[in-house]
């Protein structure tokens, strides 16, 4: 692990945590403005929500750290990794950050009984899927060539394969 990779990882984690904080506050404000977004029946699922929240946002952070350490970049398209990242969660799944956002926001929705967060999870999953299929794949194939094509063939897009 080198210093540059650690700096990129720290930058990525700071950006992700800032985004989670801002989006959480926005979701809270929306739920206060539109009380229909609050569904008290969901409180029964709070324990499952905590597990989903921790595993989902943990997956986002793990993927972000892998981008920094192994790829010397961030999840942002403006500051992409310089190297193809196939370690960490990317060993098991091509899009761990998209899946993590979906699980994390869904978990926060169950934990807080706030449907706004579940909506964010669905938006991230749909937007991530569209971006991965429409632009990201071609850009990565152009940048990383046969190495990317082999990895993409061997690694599932959204449902992890744990044996390798």
Image (cartoon, helix red, strand yellow):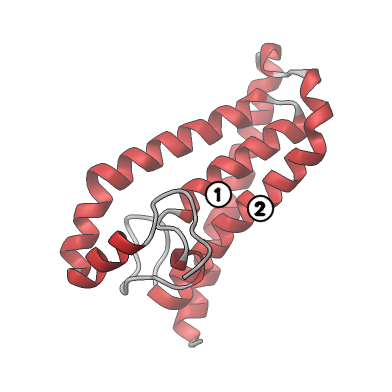
| Residue 55 disc label | 2
> Which callout, 1 or 2, points at the residue further toward the start of the chain?
2
What residue is rendered at 47% in x and 63% in y? 92
Marks 1 and 2 sit apart, C-alpha to C-alpha, by 7 Å
In the image, taking residue 28 as reference, residue 47 lies left or right, namely right
Q: Are marks 1 and 2 in contact (CB under 8 Å)?
A: yes
Question: Residue 108's x, y, as percent?
Answer: 69, 38
Residue found at the very far bottom of the displayed protein: 2
User: Camera-side residue: 116 or 21?
Assistant: 116
Q: Quadrant of residue 28?
A: top right
Give above or below for 50 relative to 38. Answer: below
| Residue 100 disc label | 1
What residue is rendered at 27% in x and 51% in y? 136
In the image, taking residue 46 as reference, residue 75 lies left or right, namely left
In the image, taking residue 40 as reference, residue 116 lies left or right, namely left
Question: Residue 7's x, y, as percent?
Answer: 50, 76
Element carrying mark 1: helix
What residue is rendered at 42% in x and 63% in y? 74
Give above or below for 5 relative to 47. Answer: below
In the image, taking residue 92 as reference, residue 106 lies left or right, namely right
Question: Residue 48's x, y, as percent?
Answer: 76, 40
| Residue 130 disc label | none
């Amino acid at each position: 692990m080198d210093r540059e990779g650690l700096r990129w990882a720290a930058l990525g984690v700071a950006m992700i945590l800032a985004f989670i904080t801002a989006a959480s506050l926005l979701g809270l404000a929306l739920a206060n403005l539109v009380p229909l977004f609050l569904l008290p029946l969901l409180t029964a699922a709070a324990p499952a929500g905590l597990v989903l929240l921790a595993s989902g946002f943990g997956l986002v952070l793990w993927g972000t750290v892998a981008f920094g350490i192994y790829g010397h970049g961030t999840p942002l398209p403006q500051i992409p990794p310089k190297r193809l990242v196939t370690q960490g969660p990317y060993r098991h799944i091509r899009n761990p950050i998209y899946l993590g956002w979906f699980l994390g926001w869904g978990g926060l929705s169950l934990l807080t009984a706030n449907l706004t967060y579940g909506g964010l999870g669905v938006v991230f999953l749909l937007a991530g899927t569209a971006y991965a299929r429409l632009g990201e794949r071609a850009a990565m194939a152009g940048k990383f060539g046969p190495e990317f094509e082999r990895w993409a063939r061997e690694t599932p897009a959204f449902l992890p394969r744990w044996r390798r």
